[in-house]
């Protein structure tokens, strides 16, 4: 499975935008880029996913580089409830029985 | 959105006993369910994948006789930790795939197991 690289931790202030980077230089053409987040003592929560084009939903935006070797999850206005571990995961459509392989993720701290 | 529940949320048991954890998809039919384990300060590690009506597929290093998985219906999967030991103490999380949203997995809230 192609791997992703994320910073171990990032810090942000409340109400400010947050850009969470992810490198995936060995991504293949059929790999989707998925983002999940995990709040303390809870199961992970789906955030967003994309293939080639940038994506927006009510939670976040996903900006995908033209060569697809990196992507950025954008939280437009961070709140204290956004403090979590954010996981960037490559998901091969139709392969590996839809398994998600979690890396270490980025621990986002949001300061009031 | 799709909801996955787990029961119990917390369980404490004595060493040598067995513990059953239930995972239910509440408003969709889950063709595939996954079981993960997460130790403190670590990431989730996939233990096994189960498809309704068939045997679970275990990840390398996971003992299938110790972690019994049953996926008898499209809305219920169970994980039984047999002869639990203190090193089995962990956060167990299930997820389910199915329903209308392709490519998305829905996670349960997790079960905290403590073996004394």
Image (cartoon, helix red, strand yellow):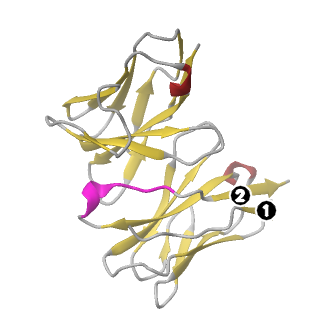
**Residue reaching furthest bottom?**
A66
| Type of secondary structure dominating the magenta stretch | loop
User: Badge 1: how crowded within 10 Å, few (<14), some, or many (20+)?
Assistant: few
- x, y (%) of residue A13? 82, 62
Of the numbered discs 1 and 2, the one sitting upstream in the chain is: 1
Comparing B96 with A56, the one in front is B96
Left or right: B110 as drawn, with respect to B71: right
- x, y (%) of residue B1? 40, 47
From which residue to which does the magenta span run?
A: A95-102
- The image shows residue B71, relative to residue B47, as above or below, that is above
Q: Chain of mark 2?
A: A
Residue on which disc 1 sits:
A11
- x, y (%) of residue A50? 42, 73
Between the residue at mark 1 and the residue at mark 2, the CA separation in whole angstroms equals 6 Å
Residue on which disc 2 sits:
A108
Q: Chain of mark 1?
A: A
Residue at 54% x, 26% y: name it.
B87
User: Badge 2: how crowded within 10 Å, few (<14), some, or many (20+)?
Assistant: many
Question: On the image, which quarter does residue B74 sit in?
Answer: top left
Left or right: B46 as drawn, with respect to A35: left
Question: On the image, which quarter does residue A15 sit in?
Answer: bottom right
- x, y (%) of residue B27? 31, 37
- The image shows residue A30, relative to residue B14, as above or below, that is below
Q: Is B41 covered by the magenta stretch?
A: no
Residue at 46% x, 84% y: name it.
A68
Is the C-beta separation of discs 1 and 2 under 8 Å?
A: yes
Residue at 79% x, 62% y: name it.
A11
Residue B101 appears in the picture as rendered: no
Tell me the quadrant of the picture where the C terminus of chain B can be found.
top right
Comparing A27 with B9, the one in front is A27
């Amino acid at each position: 499975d192609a791997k992703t690289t994320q910073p171990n931790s990032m810090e942000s202030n409340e109400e400010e935008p947050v850009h969470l980077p992810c490198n995936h230089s060995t991504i293949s053409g059929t790999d989707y880029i998925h983002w999940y987040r995990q709040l303390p003592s809870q199961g992970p929560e789906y955030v967003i996913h994309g293939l080639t084009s940038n994506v927006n939903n009510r939670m976040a935006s996903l900006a995908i580089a033209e060569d697809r070797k990196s992507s950025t999850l954008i939280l437009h206005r961070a709140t204290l409830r956004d403090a979590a571990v954010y996981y960037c995961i490559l998901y091969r459509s139709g392969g590996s029985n839809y398994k998600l392989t979690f890396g270490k993720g980025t621990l986002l701290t949001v300061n009031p | 959105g799709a909801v996955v529940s787990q029961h119990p949320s917390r369980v404490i048991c004595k060493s040598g006993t067995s513990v059953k954890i239930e995972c239910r998809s509440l408003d969709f039919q889950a063709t595939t369910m996954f079981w993960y384990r997460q130790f403190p300060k670590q990431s989730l590690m996939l233990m096994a994948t189960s498809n309704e009506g068939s045997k679970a597929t275990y990840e390398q290093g996971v003992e299938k006789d110790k972690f019994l998985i049953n996926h008898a219906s499209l809305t219920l999967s169970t994980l039984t930790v047999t002869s639990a030991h203190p090193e089995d103490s962990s956060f167990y999380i299930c997820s389910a795939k199915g329903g209308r949203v392709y490519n998305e997995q829905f996670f349960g809230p997790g079960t905290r197991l403590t073996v004394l």
